[in-house]
Image (cartoon, rainbow, N blue to C red):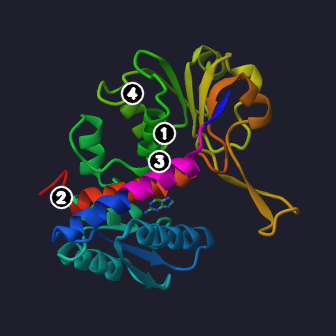
Amino acid sequence: MELIDGKQTAATIKAEIKKEVEDIVSKGGKRPHLAAILVGHDGGSETYVRNKVLACEACGFQSTLLRFEDDITEEQLLAEVDKLNKDASVDGFIVQLPLPKHISEQKVIEAIDYKKDVDGFHPINVGRMAIGLPCYISATPKGILELLRRYEIPTSGKKCVILGRSNIVGKPMAQLMMQKQFGDATVTVCHSRSKTLKEECLQADIIIAAIGQPAFLKADMVKKGVVVIDVGTTRVPDATKKSGFRLQGDVDFENVAPLCSYITPVPGGVGPMTICMLMLNTLAAGKKMYYS
Ligand code: GUN
């Protein structure tokens, strides 16, 4: 069994990005600039956004954080999005989710210029991804593809089972794993209502668990030699931790890991790759790689 080290891989990629940025700047090019909008004081969102700003520094990007209180109106927020759309110094930007209940997340996502949508959440990017056109691919599925590629894990023609059908992970992951240019695999999507979930998993060469239930995938659900990618990050109470919680994946790691050829740990697997892929998308935005 080999552990897939997302932390190390992410550090390597960030160093590669930094090198490329210095190269661009030394030739007189523009330093990539990521802006982030953060509304309110949600603990998780604060941490994510802080880590995104730190990752920008590590990559040599310019970053701008725009903070608003959670009583900002939808209209005001849409006006802020419009300002960033029109600001030529900003290559890409994100609006950190979740947003307060009185604001439509979908409306905000659709207001973002898809050419600056480095989260890859705009329907134009989602649609282009689905038919294999150049576009921003959302960070978690992109990070998983990158881990599989860097660990040279064969996917072509393999049976891949995806647990979960969310817009952010399950659905795009299925689209990408089936496409010839990415996974080239035979893909099955299972979810909380699937009657044959265990049987499907037992036949899988690759399982991507993104179902949001801690320790859901058990040892009696996998075959020997399986590759397991764990996207789960549920906070469970843990008195031995300073924070009072620990992150639990969707996989019963202790019992599943001995059966695997490769497995991602939680934390330190998919998680660190996510922000790193946002950095890769920002680099692409700076280079006008997908859209002019
Ligand atoms: N909230 C949780 N994950 C994400 C993400 O990838 N992007 C944004 N904008 N918000 C999030």
How far apart marks 1 and 4 lie (CA) works out to: 12 Å
Q: Amino acid at mark 2?
A: Lys
**Tag nearer the camera, 1 or 4:** 1
Q: Residues within 10 Å of mark 3 (few under 14, many from 20)?
A: many
Which quarter of the rendering shows the N terminus?
top right
| Residue 195 in view here | no
The tag earlier along the polypeptide, 3 or 2, is 3
For the residues labelled 4 and 2, say whether their Cβ atoms are less than 8 Å apart: no
The front one of 5 and 234 is: 5
- State which quadrant residue 205 falls in: top right
Residue underneath mark 2: 288
Q: Amino acid at mark 3?
A: Thr
How far apart marks 4 and 3 lie (CA) works out to: 15 Å
Q: Residues within 10 Å of mark 2 (few under 14, many from 20)?
A: few
- Please name the residue shown 59% across and 74% down the image: 42
Left or right: 285 in relation to 16: left
Q: Amino acid at mark 4?
A: Gly
